[in-house]
Image (spheres, helix red, strand yellow):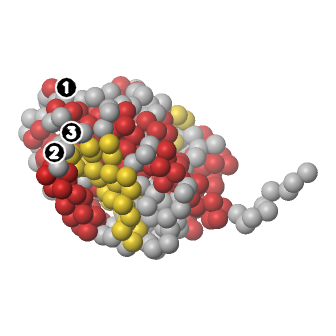
Amino acid sequence: MNLDSIPRVSLATLPTPLHEAPRLAAEIGLPRLLVKRDDNTGLALGGNKARKLEYLMADALVKRADVVLTVGGPQSNHARMTAAAARKLGMDAILFLGGPPGVVGFNGNLLLDALLDADVRYIPDGTVKQLETAMNEEANRLTARGHTPYCVPVGGSVPLGALGYVAAVRELAGQLTGQDKRCRIFTAVGSAGTIAGLELGRRLLLAEAEIVGISVSRKRKPLQKVAASVANGSSELIGAGMSFQPDDFTIIDGYVGGRYGVPSAAGNEAVLLAATTEALILDPVYTGKAMAGLIDLARSGLLTPGLTNIFLHTGGAPALFAFADHFGPPGRFAVT
């Protein structure tokens, strides 16, 4: 494995902590639960995308880019962190965001995008394909004007970006000892790059582990197909010599709720339970839905014993503030 030969720029505060969550574990019927705190990566309030961006932004620097473009939902953590990485490295940022009409407000990740002075282009109900088409068209215009744009696909979920989670598994393997290396790692799956890197890293560095993805975006089969493609590309980049098929990825798609980017009742309950048991702050559209999946699997007795359960907290807390109305009516708190 030639992971350390790939250019990488330092953007994240690493290693992130691995915390015990005993009260939450007891509440949902698990003997033990650990939380890998990738919400604490540090870049513009943290999140998992910092690990991917360390590789992607290194590539942008090699190519002498002066503006970075990417796409995402209206409360995209990836877009916010891409803008932050660009600013930190002296580049401009253009964000193409799409989602339900009428949801754009000066709050959550969008507030941080504004503070970072990112150029936000909003396309109501824009699909990923439409957003990426608009991004590529803008990149062509920028090139014609003498700029050097660097385009990052949705979620940074390309083989180069996924290497961030191969490195994360190496980090986690160093934090685990003894029987804890026989573990089950739960992660939210949005664009499938994180689970692709995790599965490649697991094969290389933590063979006794299992990776369980909880979809927060799409049905299982399309996500498995993307994950396999990305993992194969990542394996090739580092000379790992490994091949992946879609069925190599365990992804559960029953916890998305109504649609991507919109809170669900189960996700909101998971946010409240994590907060009241462990002061663990989740968000209602990514980590809240992933935790809802973990809670339901645990309470249903579907998790085989004998493995240490680990929840990968991929961040997203800024988005919580965009959904305040889901967590209590105005006037909930008494004024004295």
Disc 2 versus disc 3: distance between alpha carbons? 11 Å
Q: Residues within 10 Å of mark 2 (few under 14, many from 20)?
A: few
The residue pinned by badge 3 equals: 65
Tag 2: residue type? Gly
Q: Nearer the viewer, mark 2 or mark 3?
A: 2
Residue 310 appears at what percent x and percent y? 44, 42
The crowding category of the residue bearing disc 3, from other C-alpha atoms within 10 Å (few below 14, some 14 to 19, many at least 20), is some
Where residue 13 appears, x then y in whole percent?
A: 42, 28
Task: Choose mark 1 or mark 3, whichever is in front.
Answer: 3
Q: Secondary structure at mark 1?
A: helix
Task: Using residue 145 as the reference point, say whether residue 9 is left or right of it.
Answer: right
Tell me the kind of residue under disc 1.
Answer: Asp
The residue that appears at 49% across and 44% down in the rendered structure is: 115
Amino acid carrying mark 3 in the image: Ala
- In this rendering, the answer to whether 252 lies above or below 198 is below
262 or 152, nearer to the observer: 152
Circle count = 3
Residue indicated by mark 2: 146
Depth check, front residue: 87 or 32: 87
Query: Which residue is situated farthest in the right direction here?
Result: 336
Which mark's residue is nearer the viewer, 2 or 1? 2
Please report whichever mark, 2 or 3, sits nearer to the chain's N-terminal start: 3
Q: Which residue is mark 1?
A: 4
Asked whether residue 281 appears in the rendered view, the answer is yes
